[in-house]
Image (tube, coloured by chain):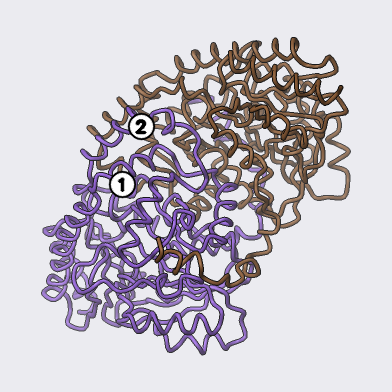
Chain colours: A brown, B purple
Amino acid sequence: MTNNDELITQVEDIGWEKRLAQRTRSMKPSFIREILKFTARPEIISFAGGLPAPELFPIREFGEACKEVLRTHGEEALQYGPTEGYQPLKQFIAEMLSKYGILVETDNIIMTNGSQQALDLIGKLFINPGDCMITSAPTYLGALQAWESYEARFCPISVDGGGIIIDDLPAILESDHEHKLIYVLPNFHNPAGTTMPLERRERLVEIAREHDLVIIEDDPYGELRYEGEYITPIFRLAPERTIYLSTFSKTLTPGIRLAYVVSPKTIITRFIQAKQGADLHTGTFVQMVVNDICQRGFLRQHVKRLRGVYSQRRDMMMDAIAEHWPQECTYTRPKGGLFLWAQAPEQIKTREFIDKALEMNVAFVPGFAFYPGGEGGDHAMRLNFSYANEELINEGIYRLGMAMKKELS
Amino acid sequence: MTNNDELITQVEDIGWEKRLAQRTRSMKPSFIREILKFTARPEIISFAGGLPAPELFPIREFGEACKEVLRTHGEEALQYGPTEGYQPLKQFIAEMLSKYGILVETDNIIMTNGSQQALDLIGKLFINPGDCMITSAPTYLGALQAWESYEARFCPISVDGGGIIIDDLPAILESDHEHKLIYVLPNFHNPAGTTMPLERRERLVEIAREHDLVIIEDDPYGELRYEGEYITPIFRLAPERTIYLSTFSKTLTPGIRLAYVVSPKTIITRFIQAKQGADLHTGTFVQMVVNDICQRGFLRQHVKRLRGVYSQRRDMMMDAIAEHWPQECTYTRPKGGLFLWAQAPEQIKTREFIDKALEMNVAFVPGFAFYPGGEGGDHAMRLNFSYANEELINEGIYRLGMAMKKELS
């Protein structure tokens, strides 16, 4: 490719950095992305990504749905569509949510390209530079990434076994910042693996009403519960001030980038405006394919299957940790979702330990990646248990245990 | 749905507007969106949207590609993928572009959800509130929408039969604003239908180098040329400072939301960061399906077919205008693309005339929608000729002519 060298590789750098907007200074390359590069190597046992098990993907059902959609609605499926999303799919979502007490109409729903886009649109709609977002610490690092690019600051609340420590919230609200939003992951928290009990959800709503806060309820894993009873979503407790996010990424497949936002109609109208400028609409074809799959009743039976497999993998991971890791290690016992949050012994800093782990062909995400500004989680690691099979989970956890013991000796 | 009424329709409005970020004040509902609501009615002859002809969509080829991708790469197709896009598709794009003198490697390309997302990411990367974007007037209204949400101001340059009047550019640059970017649509301009001759492109590059400007070259229709010779893209003339955008929306189908950005690698790295926070990545499945279609050599033959049909529709529209419209009307004679830009007689304001047209079941987009702040294009209308068939084009243009004559009498 000599021409190439001539025209592109060797062009002068016109000083792009100096042309960039102020907000790009808050945009950081993702540490997770760096780790995921390693995990592409086949010899790596990866607990790093939040990847579903690919061997469970409904490939056959997908193929049938593609065929059916193209046969019956081909022209519509390949044409531009409405910004708010495909109406029959939104109808399906409204019916599905009603089973969980989230009683809404299709006008309360907008489809997005994964929940990451929902987080980005929230930033666009709500965050002025310097605004403070209240989040758990640790929290979902995609939320930090989305909102850093709107120059948000973060007010962290610590997490215990029941999610954010709600009693810490009033003190934060009485400090001198002006707060507008609180971001929570009540079910099977990413990365902490914890679930907020009903009393905490109720207390959160009480405080939010008192201080006039908006609550962002991110619920990607709600359906992936392996034990215990379903807990009332915050949206049901405070529909007037909650923006509820969920997705098909974990229950169906992530490679289609399909998620949704539920909120009062006033604010959905603003989401539609913002999304129109951001990418016009989410792909019509993919929405119609997912609608076809869902209307056949497949989603429910598929989620049941996922629950079976993932809960066994979770159990295997917990058993393997108990067997192979130093006794000082602690970890959450998640009742659902994809992640377990573990604490290494105090002598081990996971930000450095990850290199040792990668040498042994095992990947995880070090805790600091989930803290605003990277401040916290020095000894923590997020371990995903949905992607690797049971045999690999046991082997990977064993290797991590050996590596830790070596560090300690 | 009584529960619904209880929980959502009747919840109090907590005053969402006052919570929104400053930038939302610049975000306006799209006038085009309002018109497109009418065009969903089957009795309407629509020249309003930029919609490709759905009867030409490659539905069969799409079905075959879906089947093949799921059969051979099902797990990969449904899993998370890299933010920059699917490597083999980027390879195909690099090879395709090389035929037009755009000689790049895959690292110079990022896939986006339609070119609208590329425009949004450009805003995120480059625009501080109050920054001035130089655009033609009229210009693509999606660009205005994308950049208004980053609180851009716009410096308009007028358009004549050869695109932007390049000789006006130095005066604009010497005014007191600090300018960083100029946005151009050199081929079959949306909405003006004009094409920049080579000399103007060269002159633009000269001025851009002198004033250290970045050029955004938006080229959605470049392949849809119906007459004349292909003109060297600006990117080839100034690869060091051009961000080139193109899309599969017009050559294949828009319902899959698949487009791409080409630029020096330094800035692609920043696009990747911004896109990661915005939506992680563009759907894997759709990228692999399009790759499969393209690798079979189908795109080229399909574009040939589109050229045949669309050029006939363009001719029909021009003939019908000549026959049925008042003599004072003028219009561009586009050599490609999807749009013709017409000027009604001075007595007719198209912002009001659109209501008369809709009464006669014909839709177009009034000119003002394509001007920053809606200031300009009072007598202009954008007419799309790709969506309706020849018979409907003739009938629709006839009705518009009758309506205009009625206004004049």
Count of all numbered marks drawn on residues in the image: 2
Residue at screen point 15% across, 58% down: B309
Q: Pinpoint residue B327: horizontal percent, then vertical percent.
A: 17, 82
Chain ID at mark 1: A
Looking at the rendered structure, the kind of residue marked 2 is: Val
- Give above or below for B296 relative to A57: below
Mark 1: give few (<14), some (14-19) or many (20+) Cα within 10 Å: many
Looking at the rendered structure, the kind of residue marked 1 is: Gln
Which is more toward the observer, B6 or A165?
A165
Kindly give the residue lying farthest to the front in the view shown: A2
Q: Give the mark nearest the N terminus, 2 or 1.
A: 1
Q: Secondary structure at mark 1?
A: loop
Q: Pinpoint residue B63: horizontal percent, then vertical percent.
A: 25, 35
- The quarter of the displayed image where residue A134 is located: top right
Residue annotated with mark 1: A79
Q: Pinpoint residue A408: horizontal percent, then vertical percent.
A: 86, 23
Which is more toward the observer, B172 or A333?
A333
Residue annotated with mark 2: A289
Whole-number angstrom distance, CA of label 2 to CA of label 1: 14 Å
Left or right placement of residue B27 versus residue B379 in this view? right
